[in-house]
Amino acid sequence: MNLLFKDLFGIFKIFEDVYERVRKLLVPTTAYSWQTFIYLSVFSWVMSYFATGYIRDIIALCGWLFLIAGTAWYTTDDPLRVPGTFMPVGAVITGFLVSVFAFSNQEDVISSRTVVLWPTISALITAIPEFIEGSDTDSKTRIPKPDARQKIIVLVASCMMISCWLQFYFVLDKWLQEYPSLLAENFGRSTFVITREEQQKIPTNGVVILDRLQPLVEEQIAERPWSEVERWLLEANVRVGQLGREVLNNNLAQYEEKALWRVEPRVVNNKSGYRLDLLSIWTGPTANPRGYFLRKSCQIDPVATTPINTNTNSRTPEEKKAVAEIQCDRLNKLFSGAAPPQQ
């Protein structure tokens, strides 16, 4: 029985210790403490919810300032250092809050600018105490000692380099979103670009252009009188150019690389009729100095049609008319180098 009571008192002692730690964390010993700033920030955000207009913005601004001040105070009381540096973990947390406060917006709280400037702001926050000496009530500025200057320069420069690499990542990511055809390039010799996904063997947008262009061309040629088709082929540069611009505007409007694709035809006369090559030519940056282009070939032949004779008493044979028949390749082909010249 005594052992049972001893175990119960031990359990109560654990709860009592936990309660004391929580109370010490939440209840400030003095009014001038980091808990006061945190509570003021929560109170400001609650009040800003009920406010409107510029009053709401001012109260929210005060909430952010209280939160940053309280977090900085709490994390610098007993600082935990980032391994290998003299940067406190609290400076990293405070730097993140400052970056979010300064560069976020209502649509995107954590933007690329927030992440890029986070390391540099954290380094500057770490360096600020080195320029101040004295207590909280009696302090003045000073020039850091030579050994401290070296540490500050190395820390700030290292964090600025990290910010540059982060910015470089976001720039490349934006380029690949606006110019997805760059994913078809070979980055095997690059020292700073690593492709995690399987490399595209053929540019997707180049394929989209020709696949959307093909039915438009077939619609203007198929089953049309052969004389009209030959006249259409004589004006193929203008006709295909207009259709190509329509395809680019309808299917690549969301990409900046739309202006780097050019659509051109090539007409070749053969024994049975004509071969119409539809080309989507990439004029943007590429590892191949001569560029590349995609081709879809269409064979156009005249086909005689037997007209319907509505006069059954007539013995005069009806004249057969030739119309165009067009058959296009199912797949697109990729070619390195400049597009073939016009004939």
Image (cartoon, helix red, strand yellow):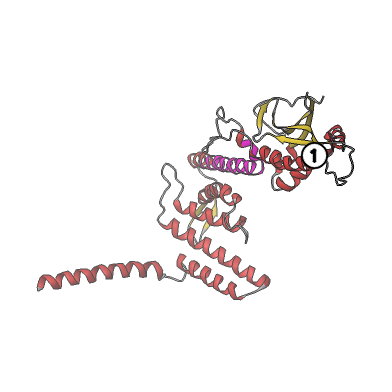
Q: Tell me residue 121's x, y (percent).
A: 56, 50
Q: State yes or no: residue 180 in magenta.
A: yes
Q: Which residues are magenta?
A: 155-182
Q: For this view, does 291 lie left or right of residue 143?
A: right
Question: At numbered mark 1, what does the secondary structure look like: helix, strand or loop?
Answer: helix
Instruction: Residue under label 1, please give it.
Output: 221
- Please indicate, yes or no, whether residue 244 appears anywhere in the rendered image: no
Task: Between residue 127 and residue 65, name the one nearer to us.
Answer: 65
Q: Is residue 67 visible?
A: yes
What secondary structure do most residues of the magenta stretch adopt? helix
Who is closer to the viewer here, 119 or 252?
Answer: 252
Q: Nearer the viewer, residue 187 or 143?
A: 187
Q: Nearer the viewer, residue 202 or 163?
A: 202
- Residue 151 belongs to magenta span: no
Q: Position of residue 216 (x, y in %)?
A: 76, 43
Extreme residue in the bottom direction? 50
Q: Amino acid at mark 1?
A: Ile
The N terminus lies in which quarter of the figure?
bottom left
Residue sitting at 49 percent across and 70 percent down?
39
